[in-house]
Amino acid sequence: MIDPAIVGKRITSSTHFTVNQDAITRFCQAIGERDDSVAPPTFSFTFIIAAFEETLKGAGVDWSRMVHGDQRFEIREPIKAGDRLSISSTVESVRSAAGNELVTVRADIEREGQEIIHAWSTLVVRG
Amino acid sequence: MNLTLGEVLPTRIFTIDRSALKAYADASGDQNPIHQDESFAKSVGLPNVIAHGMLTMALGGTYLADFFGGSSKIRKFGARFTKPVVVAEDVPAKVEFSGAITAIESGIVTVELTARHGDQKVLGMAKAEITID
């Protein structure tokens, strides 16, 4: 069972990280995108998931039964090579449906003190 | 761009084979064995290896970016992962994307995206908001 007390928990990464062109280029190549001048809209999920894992640590999430239920991005500015980013993640809700447990987590990605991307994931722990 | 409400975008098929899954696993860091190891996938009750849901969604992003003039135009993008895309060793999955323009307002178009594998819709409620010039 996911502990409902986790709702509202927010963790901000203590370190910034820099996005390199090679990571963007490899991602673009893997998804058939020829233009690697900016990161594709779903690129941020490659580092968001680790932030979610950290935020949900100790909450009773069985990762071996986890599937990705849905995903949503709001992108004010796309990520580019050389960007120094930080990420915060917040647990928005925990609920049960059809014998599964669903947790919705939001990521806020900042560049130079400005939020550039918000992303929401619903993660489903199959019952 | 000259776009009209209700306009339907040309369909495009993306082929997902095992090497594409390996490439996406390496590029995204998602090395879950259900996307690469057939015996593991079957041991957890799947019919075979399945594609990363985020790969299917990303291909939808590529489809939209190509049509609208680049990834940087995509301001909102969301989807549900309704059915897994099964990728057998010798049967690459062909996922067909299509889209329809459901709103145009203040330089932003809303596109409802459809992704099909065979007779199954593999994304649900897939929608994007895209800036147009």
Image (tube, coloured by chain):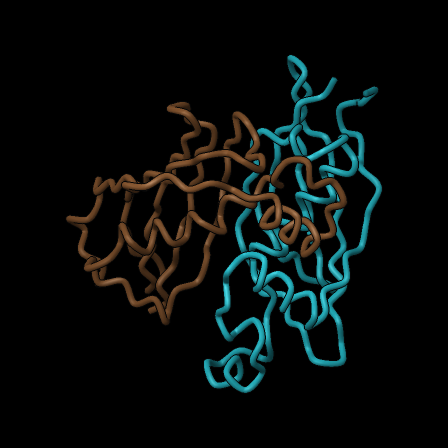
| Whether residue B42 is situated above or below residue A50 in the rendered picture | below
* Residue B87: quarter of image: bottom right
> Which residue is outermost to the top?
B106
Horizontal relation, residue A112 to residue B21: left or right:
left
Please report the residue visible at 49 percent of the width from the left and 81 percent of the height from the top: B45
Which quadrant is home to the C terminus of chain B? top right
Q: Which chain is brown?
A: A
Q: Is residue B18 above or below residue A71?
A: below
Quadrant of res A43: top right
Q: Position of residue B121 (x, y in %)?
A: 65, 56
Residue B10, image x, y percentages: 84, 41
The number of callouts visible is 0
- Where does the N terminus of chain B fall, quadrant-wise? top right
Measuring from the top left, give residue A44's x and y in whole percent: 50, 44
* Residue A36 position (above or below residue A32): above
Front-most of residues B93 and A58: A58
Residue at the left extreme of this rendering: A5
Name the colour assigned to chain B in the rendering: cyan
Residue B27, given in percent of the width and then of the height, sits at 58, 58
Residue, x 36% and y 71% (percent of image)? A64
What's the residue at 32%, 56% (across, down)? Answer: A53
Query: On the image, which quarter does residue A63 sit in?
Result: bottom left
Q: Residue at x 35, y 63 (%)?
A: A125
